């Protein structure tokens, strides 16, 4: 009888041990799948990071000429369409352009940030030299925006829309590639266009108006740089 009880107990112990062994094997079998899933996720995340292109950094200060540069623009369609533009840098973030069309001189001062070029001062009949302090330049309010990032086709700001960022622009000075074309249409239907290129800034402007099916246009195009 004792021998029978001992045999039964031995068999029970064997069954328990076998169950534990199977469970351990099953758990071990699950681990490689979990590791594989984690590895695949890491690979996918790495591929996504590699595929994402880095955004090109744009230095908006490049859309102005050097300090003291004088640009001459050839006009067509109006006696005041021709003008001379002189560039004056105040500091690395502020620049003024004096525009003389023979009838008057207009001063425009701009503040350059990482995201935009903002007009902060505009004054006609300005025949002096503008020499503001850095503090004055910082406190001048924004009047409008000349350019704003991102420079992408279809983007808009201050009623201007970016029509093209790869425009070919023919001027008497030279033919430019990769120009930026901005366009605005006012309530009367008149169209204004501005053309910009890096290292020069605005190289052409257009004003187009239709009256009784007759199109009237005024253009100013870069002719020379001194």
Image (spheres, grey):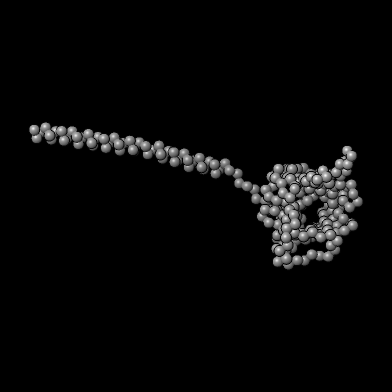
Q: Which of the pair 47/21 is nearer the observer?
A: 21
Residue 92 at least partly seen = yes
Residue 127 in the image: above or below residue 77: below
Q: Which of the pair 217/95 is nearer the observer?
A: 217
Q: Quadrant of residue 133?
A: bottom right
Q: Judge left or right: residue 43 versus residue 168.
A: left
Residue at 85% x, 63% y is 127
Q: Quadrant of residue 142?
A: bottom right
Q: Position of residue 40 (x, y in %)?
A: 47, 39
Q: Which of the pair 46/176 is nearer the observer?
A: 46
Q: Position of residue 198 (x, y in %)?
A: 73, 50
In the rendered image, the quadrant that contains the C terminus is bottom right
Residue at 73% x, 53% y is 145
Residue at 33% x, 38% y is 27
Q: Residue furthest right?
A: 79
Q: Position of residue 164 (x, y in %)?
A: 73, 43
In the rendered image, the quadrant that contains the N terminus is top left
Q: Judge left or right: residue 60 versus residue 73.
A: left
Q: Position of residue 3 (x, y in %)?
A: 10, 33
């Amino acid at each position: 009888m004792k021998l029978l009880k001992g045999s039964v107990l031995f068999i029970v112990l064997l069954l328990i041990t076998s169950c534990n062994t199977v469970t351990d094997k099953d758990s071990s079998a699950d681990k490689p799948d979990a590791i594989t899933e984690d590895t695949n996720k890491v690979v996918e995340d790495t591929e996504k990071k590699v595929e994402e292109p880095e955004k090109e950094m744009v230095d908006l200060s490049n859309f102005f000429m050097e300090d003291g540069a004088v640009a001459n623009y050839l006009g067509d369609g109006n006696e005041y369409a021709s003008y001379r533009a002189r560039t004056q840098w105040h500091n690395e973030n502020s620049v003024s352009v004096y525009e003389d069309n023979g009838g008057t001189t207009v001063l425009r001062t701009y503040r350059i940030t990482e995201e935009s070029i903002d007009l902060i001062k505009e004054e006609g009949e300005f025949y002096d030299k503008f020499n503001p302090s850095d503090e004055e330049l910082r406190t001048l309010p924004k009047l409008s925006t000349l350019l704003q990032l991102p420079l992408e086709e279809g983007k808009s700001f201050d009623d201007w829309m970016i029509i093209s960022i790869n425009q070919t622009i023919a001027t008497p000075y030279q033919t430019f590639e990769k120009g930026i074309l901005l366009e605005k249409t006012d309530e009367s239907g008149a169209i204004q266009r501005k053309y910009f290129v890096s290292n020069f800034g605005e190289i052409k402007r257009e004003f187009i108006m239709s009256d009784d099916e007759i199109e009237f246009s005024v253009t100013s195009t870069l002719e020379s740089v001194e």
